[in-house]
Amino acid sequence: MFDRYGGKAMRRRKIVGWIILFLGLASLGHTEDFSLQYFLAKASTKEYEPSKKEKVELLDRMNEMLEKTQQVHKNLVQAIQGGEITMEYQEGRFWMAKLEEDRGSIETGIQQLKLLKEKPNHLAGSIKLYKSLRDLSVNFNAYNNMPLLSAYVGDLAPEMELWADPVFYKLYLLPLAVLKDKETEPGKEKKPITKDKKL
């Protein structure tokens, strides 16, 4: 009698365990949905309008990518300054100047991301973030063309380029610019009407 009830309790625990495991895996799968491949597929779809949730997830992925960029940047600076990467003085100065530009672009990108999380429809913030990403992408691709520096950068340069354009540009910046353009259209129509009334 006791064994029978104990067996039922065990079965219930197993079922509950399987449900928890299934829900855990489903939630993991859900976060993996918002990968670079996911957004690239959406960006290649004609006239696709991302949902609010997708925009939030996109900004989160951009934040993760900028954090990775910041770490790689830090490693590159330490390697050059610490002598792990040996190069001529002039060449070292050139690359350190590029890395200094990157530092500014990373800081600007992080600031604009914070702004966009608070004000998702901020067009100027979106444009500044896009420019930062493009500038970083250009420099990191240049590092990838240098055998001494490419080992530190790896796949980050092409990944960054794809996040900037087409993903961020097509799924966030462009729809926002179109929306802002539509918002200003009625104002443009009102101006001639008020002039006509004065005449």
Image (cartoon, helix red, strand yellow):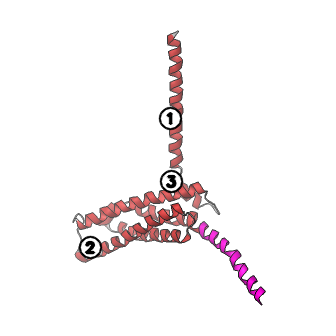
Taking the image as shown, residue 138 lies to the left or right of residue 86, namely right
Q: Which residue matches tag 2?
A: 92
Taking the image as shown, residue 133 lies to the left or right of residue 49, namely left
Name the spot of residue 122 as percent of width and height, x first.
Answer: 55, 68
Sort mark 2 into few (<14), some (14-19) or many (20+) by Cα contacts within 10 Å.
some
Mark 1, secondary structure of its residue: helix
Confirm whether residue 124 shows in the render: yes
Residue 100 vertical placement versus 20 (above, below):
below
Q: Amino acid at mark 2?
A: Gly
| Residue 1 or residue 48, whichever sits in front | 1
Name the spot of residue 168 as percent of width and height, x first.
Answer: 53, 64
Question: Residue drawn 69% across and 77% down?
Answer: 187
Which is closer to the viewer, label 1 or label 3?
A: 1
Quadrant containing the C terminus is: bottom right
- Lower sequence index among marks 3 and 2: 3
Sort mark 3 into few (<14), some (14-19) or many (20+) by Cα contacts within 10 Å.
few
- What mark, if any, has residue 82 been given in the picture? none
| Residue 41 or residue 19, whichever sits in front | 19
- Identify the magenta region: 175-199
Name the spot of residue 193 as percent of width and height, x first.
Answer: 76, 82
Q: Amino acid at mark 3?
A: Ser
Distance in Å between CA atoms under marks 3 and 2: 36 Å
Q: Which residue matches tag 1?
A: 21
Question: Residue drawn 51% across and 25% down?
Answer: 13
Q: Quadrant of residue 196?
A: bottom right
Q: Which residue matches tag 3?
A: 35
| Residue 36 or residue 146, whichever sits in front | 36
Question: Residue drawn 51% across and 69% down?
Answer: 125
Q: Amino acid at mark 1?
A: Leu
